[in-house]
Amino acid sequence: MNLRLPYLREKTAKLTASPGVYLMKNQKSEIIYIGKAKNLKKRVTSYFREFADHLPKVASMVEHVYDYDFIVTDSEYEALVLECSLIKQYQPKYNILLKDDKGYSYLCFSHEAYPRLTAEKNQKKDGDYLGPYMSGFVTRETAREVNRVFRLPTCHKQFPRDLKKSRPCLNYYIKQCMGVCRGTISELDYAEIIHQAKDYIQVGSTDSVKRMQMEMEKAADALDFERAAMLRDRIQAVTKAGETQKILDISLKEADVIAMAEHSGTQCISVLCYRNGRLFDKEAFFFQETVSHKELMDSFLTQYYEHHRSGIPKQIILEFVLQNQDMYEQLLTKFSGTHIHLIVPQRGKLLQYVQLSRNNANEELALRFNRTGKEVQALEELGKAFGFAQPPQYIEAYDISNLSSTSMVCGMVVFENGRPLKRAYKRFRMKEHVTQDDYACMQEALTRRLKHYLEKDNEGFSRLPDLILLDGGQGHVHAIQPIVQSFGLSIPVYGMVKDQKHRTRAISSAGGEISPSPNSAAFHLLTRIQDEVHRFSVAYMHSLHAKSSYQLELIKVRGIGEKKAQKLLLHYKTMARMRQASPDELAKVAGVRIETAQELFDLLQEMGSAADAATEQ
């Protein structure tokens, strides 16, 4: 506990209600946190109130606060500008600091008689470099596109050493390479092609096409039809490449598209940069913050564009509306010197751009956590559909199974981070309810599961789920919610509803049904969970029913009762293994005389022969 809290509360009680910025300091007078407030007194008081329920990061910061300073401003907007400037100056420990862990990438034209174009992560190689570029992805794609458009060689041959020494490779015959190895292209002609390739990268396809168009017309006027035809083909290739680089078949002149994804407590913000109607760059930033997505985006925008003042586009497309969005437009307009629009699309193609940016964030998280982008996306969609603050990482699903009111069981499967966690699967055999009553059986299973958690008597039940899914509709949800609440727990409970063809149709809650899009990643995950829990519970029911049938056969032997039959089944697991046992082994396991064991052995062989005969028929 912070022993300075009484002093801090007394100081804050006299604080002004004006807007401004506050600077939290530790015992060494180091600034550890900077924040803005519309009402300084109200905001700062929230940190030091008694029995405050802070998030872990805030609680840690408050624990280290020895004193604080404040600066009063005339408006909340001025407070925002000042906060941004001070954070950049002091880099406080507990502020969300904009850091990314990637380096720069370059395009390199090697220094040799016939230069090659490659994407490089540094400038160690001897050559002419273009860049740096923030996105390694865009750099690699650019190198691949330019090599394809201008048919530059990408093989391992060395020129002029390997000229005319072998036949051209497949790339030449499929028109992906000009065939330098044939020895028909001079160094001078090749250098001109490299010049055009550099021009294409630096000024874009439009200007490149104009220049090549002029050269083609000059060649035609000079009756150099071979060169004119070559330029014509190159113009067509560049034009086609320019068209294929337009995302979603639409030209986005100048904009940044920003979206966010989260997985296992790590957030990723993706920035897709569009310039001249083309995807120009991509950046990804990772955070581990406990603040809301909107708070994180607030801090990100101010810090990101503080570092990119000279390149702020006129349009910034976001996935959700910010609090005081007009104020952020005003700040970014001040940074840029031109009017900036923050756009939050609700439909149409701009919304598809947002989804594309979010997909990129999901893929970045998937790489970091060794997951697939679909798994990350499914959990994020599920969290949004249910209105969760964070995607559910640990999901438990339950299903009741029985056979004509016998062998009443419940299966529990667990999905962690979108994948089955089979070591955490559990099976419940009904003890109190042995008749066909799905609601009562589900209540018994959940009661036993949560009781194990509270009593901490079973390590397999030591973790609470973020979400409970039941194979059933509203009736199941109404039956289980009171059970969860009676244990003093707050776990979301939803039912998985099937259609007439026994396929997942919707998700049921106490308030109604939610129907995810059948094409969404969330829907596919729910379907997978429902199929898996059904398979697991049915398999357990069939195994119990089979054992029950075997037990009835075993107790026909005089001297073998229910307990001895259960002992034999538990020891041998399967009837096939029991049939392989000798009379002496059976006598030892069951604890019976050798005569009884011999009779049991004969019965087992007879059952095995009958089963084999049935199989042959």
Image (cartoon, helix red, strand yellow):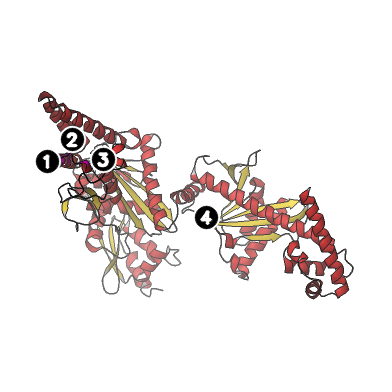
- Mark 2: amino acid: Ser
Residue tagged 1: 188
- Mark 4: amino acid: Arg
Q: Is residue 340 visible?
A: no
Q: Residue 177, which numbered label?
A: 3
> Residue 578: image x %, image y %?
76, 66
Dot 4 crowding, Cα within 10 Å, few <14, some 14–19, many 20+: some
Distance of label 4 from label 1 (alpha carbons) = 58 Å
Distance of label 3 from label 1 (alpha carbons) = 18 Å
* Magenta stretch in the rendered image: 182-193
Residue tagged 2: 208
Q: Which mark lies nearer to you, 4 or 1?
A: 1
- Is 344 placed above or below 58 here? above
Identify the residue at the far left of this view: 222
Q: Which mark lies nearer to you, 3 or 2?
A: 3
Distance of label 3 from label 2 (alpha carbons) = 20 Å
Proximity of marks 3 and 2: CB atoms separated by less than 8 Å: no
Proximity of marks 2 and 1: CB atoms separated by less than 8 Å: no
Which label's residue is closer to the chain start, 4 or 1? 1
Residue closest to the eye, 298 or 143? 143
Position of 200 with respect to 354 (left or right) is: left
- Mark 1: amino acid: Leu
Q: Which mark lies nearer to you, 2 or 1?
A: 1
Kindly identify the residue that appears in the image at 29 percent across and 55 percent down: 18
Q: How many marks?
A: 4
Residue tagged 4: 419
Indicate whether residue 184 is drawn in magenta.
yes
Magenta stretch, main secondary structure, is: helix
Which label's residue is closer to the chain start, 3 or 2? 3
Distance of label 2 from label 4 (alpha carbons) = 49 Å
Which label's residue is closer to the chain start, 3 or 1? 3
- Mark 3: amino acid: Cys
